[in-house]
Amino acid sequence: MIANIVKPGNKTYGVLAYLFDKGRANEHTDQHIVASWDNFIPDPGPWDSPGHKQRLGQLTQALDLRVKQAGDKAPEGHVWHCSVRAAPEDRALTDAEWATIARRMVHATGIAPDGDPDGCRWVAVRHADDHIHIVATKVRGDLRPPRNWNDYRRAMNELTAVEEDFGLTRVPRGPEAAAGTSAVKRSTRAEEEKAKRRGHDKTARERLRHVVRTALSHAKDLEEFFNLLADAGLQVETRTLLSGDLGGYKVALSDDSTPIWYSGSSLATDLSLPQIRQRLAATEAQPTAASSTRQHRPSPWHVATAAAERIPHHLAHADDGAVQAHLTVFGEILYALPAHAPARLQAELQRAAAAFEHAAHTRARADHQHARALRGALKAMRYQPADHTGLAMLLDVAILVVLAVQRHSALHHHRQVAAARQTLTHLQAAYAQIAPNSLAALARHYPSDNTVNRYARTLHDVLPHHAEQILTENSWPALTATLAAAEAAGHNPATVLQQAAQHRPLDDAKSASEVLVWRIQRLGDRHAPGPGARTAQARRLPAQTAPQTEPGLPGAYTPPASRAGRSR
């Protein structure tokens, strides 16, 4: 639950009139009092009910009685107004439950302590399923002000207990909130109602945020960022300071007859102009399409995958700024992927990106310099479109990253865990669609039977605990083709197998052969070691047993009949 205590005012009637009114977009329904300091006060009821204004005036007079009695001693801002909202995923609470919550809130904040006959006068109004408003006048029966300092902190502490007692979603607070509160700005109820009226499943704020994040994931500088926003159909305005420097920007949907503008910071705190500038400035120079032909350079897809693969380590060992930098650019990668993916995967990847921003974007200040290589690889992807293998390889690691984020958040940040779980579902669905074709494409380069048998013996030598499982997996042909390609590039098959297994555990993998395929794909993209280095690598390998080649013994491998017809 979330409480919001607004700045004290002095117009009791105005606040009550709003609460019992129809709302800006008819969002207020069945307006009624669920609890108060006095069970006999008049309930004004909905705005269009007979005698509504008369009862509203009577309620205002009753609440303001002690304020008038206090005269000049009454505080200037005598109206205390607090809203309490349940989480979207919570069940609908009954009036009786909301009444209990309201009484606990006025007690905890010092407005009307339990058993105090001189407590302030207050009412709790419900005009929607998911929240109530508590309005009180800050003059006690003894005409003194209430002791309600630190009311917000006390309200938050009480809501933590309410969530536990009522079985509601736990919202991060205190140090937990500082590390885990999402930077994404929530849409208002009016925005949600407008989207429904127009037949949209997302609000204008959400649609704009998606377009802005997607543009940022592709842009190399501010000029291109604004051009991409315009190309996507948004209305864009920038603000120039007296010095001539750019001071900010705002965007609006082009399909609005009367545009409603949103600044970048109103979409998400990390989309403000200063934050965007920092992220773009931290991009490490990467080769363009023209320069990449002059000499061999690793694929940016391999670089991005290798860099993302280190994020779980950063989560466990790096400081908050470095962690947030890597998670921020990883989120940008998820927003960039749909443009590089087949049409059938784009919807899943878009949903994964939208879910991940709730899982990873926090209020921690990101030190973007820590993720320069990853962001540089992201920008270079535009010059080298991915084949299915590169995309599947990156998705495989993306799943690992999200699993690590889920574990990292599990101690406190329950909403982040839920968002990570949603992200994981979409990424796994996308991977399941593309991986089989990618592995089949690799398997078409299946090497000769002698080479396959040699790789099987090497597998038994290097990974004796996993060899038998790997030899029976559907991705074994793709693994042999990957080993053959790495060997042709000058790598030692035993060395790359060992390195791949050391870098990523195989015990909990659904398919150990798939894990090895994608890891060796990246290792094989590196420059092959020279003769001296290969000799040193061989010395570091575990002592190898003499290979056994008799049929049926470990180390011998006979391709099944179904594989005999594969192209060599």
Image (cartoon, helix red, strand yellow):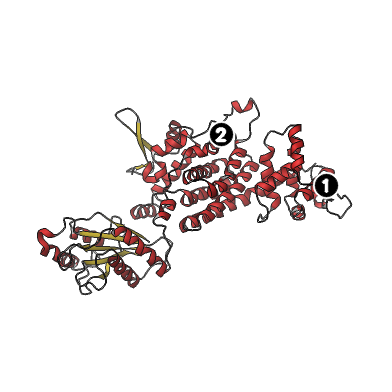
Query: Most extreme residue toward the top, as rendered?
Result: 294
Tell me the amino acid under the disc marked 2: Ala
In the image, which is nearer the foreground, mark 1 or mark 2?
Answer: 1
Above or below, comparing residue 162 to residue 289 in the picture: below
Residue that badge 2 annotates: 380
Q: Residue at x 63, y 48 (%)?
A: 434
Return the x and y of residue 210 as percentages of the image width and height: 45, 45
Return the x and y of residue 147 as percentages of the image width and height: 23, 62
Q: Could you tell whether 488 is left or right of 407 in the image?
A: right
Return the x and y of residue 39 as percentages of the image width and height: 23, 74
Q: Residues within 10 Å of mark 2 (few under 14, many from 20)?
A: many
Residue toward you, 43 or 305: 305
Residue that badge 1 annotates: 453
**Image quadrant in which the N terminus is located:** bottom left
Q: Could you tell whether 381 is left or right of 482 in the image?
A: left
* Secondary structure at numbered mark 2: helix
Return the x and y of residue 48 as percentages of the image width and height: 23, 64
Above or below, comparing residue 82 to residue 394 in the picture: below
Mark positioned earlier in the residue sequence (1 or 2):
2
Residue toward you, 261 or 525: 525
**Image quadrant in which the C terminus is located:** top right
Mark 1 and mark 2 in contact? Answer it, CB < 8 Å: no
Residue toward you, 365 or 376: 365
